[in-house]
Image (tube, rainbow, N blue to C red):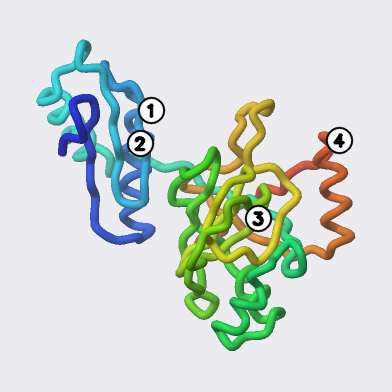
Amino acid sequence: MPAGDRALVVEFGNEIAPAIHARVRALTQALQVRPIRGIVEVVPTYRSLLVYFDPMQVDPAALEQALLDRVRQREALQLPQPTVTVIPVCYGGEFGPDLPFVCEHTGLSADEVIRIHTGRDYLIYMLGFTPGFPYLGGMDERIAAPRLESPRTKIPAGSVGIAGRQTGVYPVESPGGWRIIGRTPIKLYDPYREPPVLLEPGNYVRFRAVTRAEYEAIAEQVAAGTYRVEVVPKAAEH
């Protein structure tokens, strides 16, 4: 469907689901492998793909038909094996000012919330809001918590938050209304790094709890440029 006079939206469903997102990724990759003349940029979301185009190079109707053809061909495309990026997090205290609220809201102890939050891999559905902000799916509903009634005007980079059944990480200092439960010392966005964004849609994130001392040690390595982010293959799910 049209999105203004320079973009089309390809929708694959109306819910947050891994199978729908896989179709979004498949079309994204298909357009990267075999670009269509006139496409300027594609932006994947939870359930759709936004396609920007140059109307001086391609007719919108012709582009729509070309996209439909690619959608029909995408089933044959093999998506790459996903990876899991392990993100160390120091939970609670000054790094996680909303952890007590999450405990009170859910009736769980801090240890239980942390155990549940670190107990699974989260699919990276999309990036947005700020550079490299990952919208992660698959969080356990037992630790779901509402957004703040009044967003904070400043949240430190690396803060790990919960909003409803979603969880994510603030790559840069910014305003925000998610419940902050911890902080990571690693940089999800660094304009001097290539690529500047650490994560990629279609891969996964796994949180690992660390102590304050471990946090400080990793922060020193990050500052020195010697820290190597742990990335492992995603095990097949049965």
Whether pointer 1 and pointer 4 mark residues with C-beta atoms closer than 8 Å, the reply is no
Assign a secondary structure to mark 3.
strand
* Dot 4 amino acid type: Ala
Q: Residues within 10 Å of mark 2 (few under 14, many from 20)?
A: many
Task: Compare residues 101 and 43 and report the one nearer the observer.
Answer: 101
Q: Position of residue 127 (x, y in %)?
A: 47, 44
Q: Position of residue 54 (x, y in %)?
A: 25, 17
Mark 4 sits on what residue?
A: 224
Q: Residues within 10 Å of mark 3 (few under 14, many from 20)?
A: many
**Could you tell me the amino acid type at mark 2?**
Thr
Measured from the top left, where is residue 198 in percent x and y? Answer: 61, 40
- State if disc 4 and disc 2 touch (CB < 8 Å): no
Task: Residue at 63% x, 50% y: name it.
Answer: 85
- The CA span between labels 2 and 4 is 36 Å
Q: For the view shown, which residue lies furthest in the bottom direction?
A: 107
* Comes first in the chain, label 3 or label 2: 2
The answer to which quarter of the image holds residue 235 is: bottom right
Mark 1 highlights which residue?
A: 32
Q: Which residue is mark 2?
A: 28
* Image quadrant in which the N terminus is located: top left
Q: Which residue is mark 3?
A: 159
